[in-house]
Image (cartoon, grey):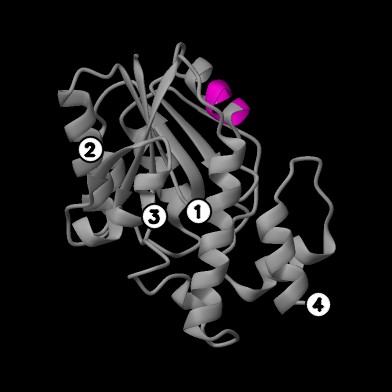
């Protein structure tokens, strides 16, 4: 197994999830959305010989929620998102993986096909990025350690993708991008997913949206 795919996620049982939505939702509702997203992502990421699937959660207690899924488990370490992602890539490259791909838990359209596309890109480039509509990214992968892409980034802003690409260009590193998708961070993202139809099944997220956003 040459590739590690790592989903960074909080546990909807013990953590406060989707806190940017709690101006419109209760924390219980926001955690319910996180549950739906996780269920749909795991439903659409099929087992493949080309990768191992990992989940990285904030604490050991958080990891308990993910034991029922077919995945390996890690605890996130670091003071901010960049430090956490850098630590995860360091750990997994040290374990012998040739490629490491990090994904979030808030883009319900994620599939094993997208992951396979990302893996193929890494055969010919140093880094692959899945751009998010809000200026961030829902996926980032690399075929070797690139610690500089996790430093000096204004996380949770619309500058994330631009700053990451600038760092890659400054280091003369080859990079490709996947299609743009929308993750679910803000209320307008929920409105978008409520009004749109998708060929990829996201039954749990769609059901949650029908109950809370229509």
Q: Secondary structure at mark 3?
A: loop
Q: Name the residue tied to disc 2.
A: 147
Q: Earlier in the sequence, mark 2 or mark 1?
A: 1
- Work out how far the residue at label 2 is from the one at label 3, CA to CA, in angstroms: 21 Å
- Work out how far the residue at label 2 is from the one at label 4, CA to CA, in angstroms: 43 Å
| Viewer can see residue 59 | no
Q: What's the magenta bit mostly, secondary-structure-wise?
A: helix
Q: Which mark is residue 9?
A: 3
Q: Secondary structure at mark 2?
A: helix
Q: Earlier in the sequence, mark 1 or mark 3?
A: 3
Q: Name the residue tied to disc 1.
A: 136
Q: Name the residue tied to disc 4.
A: 214
Residue 81 percent location from the top left of the image: 29, 56
- Residue appearing at x 73%, y 64% in the figure: 207
Q: Earlier in the sequence, mark 2 or mark 3?
A: 3
Asked if the residue under mark 1 is in contact with the one under mark 4, i.e. CB atoms within 8 Å, the reply is no
Q: What is the span of residues highlighted in magenta in the rendered image?
A: 113-117
- Work out how far the residue at label 4 is from the one at label 3, CA to CA, in angstroms: 26 Å
Q: Earlier in the sequence, mark 4 or mark 3?
A: 3
Q: In the image, is residue 143 above or below residue 57?
A: above
């Amino acid at each position: 197994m040459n590739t590690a795919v790592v989903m960074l996620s909080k546990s909807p049982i013990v953590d406060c999830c989707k806190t940017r939505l709690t101006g419109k939702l209760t924390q219980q509702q926001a955690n319910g959305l996180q549950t739906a997203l996780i269920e749909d992502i795991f439903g659409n990421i099929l087992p493949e010989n080309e990768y191992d699937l990992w989940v990285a959660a904030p604490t050991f207690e958080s990891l308990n929620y993910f034991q029922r899924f077919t995945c390996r488990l890690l605890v996130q370490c670091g003071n901010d998102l960049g430090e956490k992602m850098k630590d995860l890539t360091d750990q997994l490259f040290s374990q012998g993986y040739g490629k490491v791909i990090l994904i979030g838990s808030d883009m319900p359209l994620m599939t094993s096909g997208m992951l396979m596309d990302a893996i193929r890109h890494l055969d010919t480039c140093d880094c692959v990025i899945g751009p998010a509509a809000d200026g961030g990214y829902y996926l980032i992968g690399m075929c070797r350690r690139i610690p500089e892409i996790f430093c000096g980034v204004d996380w949770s802003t619309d500058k994330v993708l631009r700053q990451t690409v600038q760092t890659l260009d400054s280091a003369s590193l080859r990079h490709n991008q996947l299609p743009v998708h929308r993750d679910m961070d803000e209320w307008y993202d929920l409105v978008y997913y409520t009004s749109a139809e998708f060929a990829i099944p996201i039954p749990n997220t769609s059901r949650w949206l029908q109950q809370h956003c229509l």
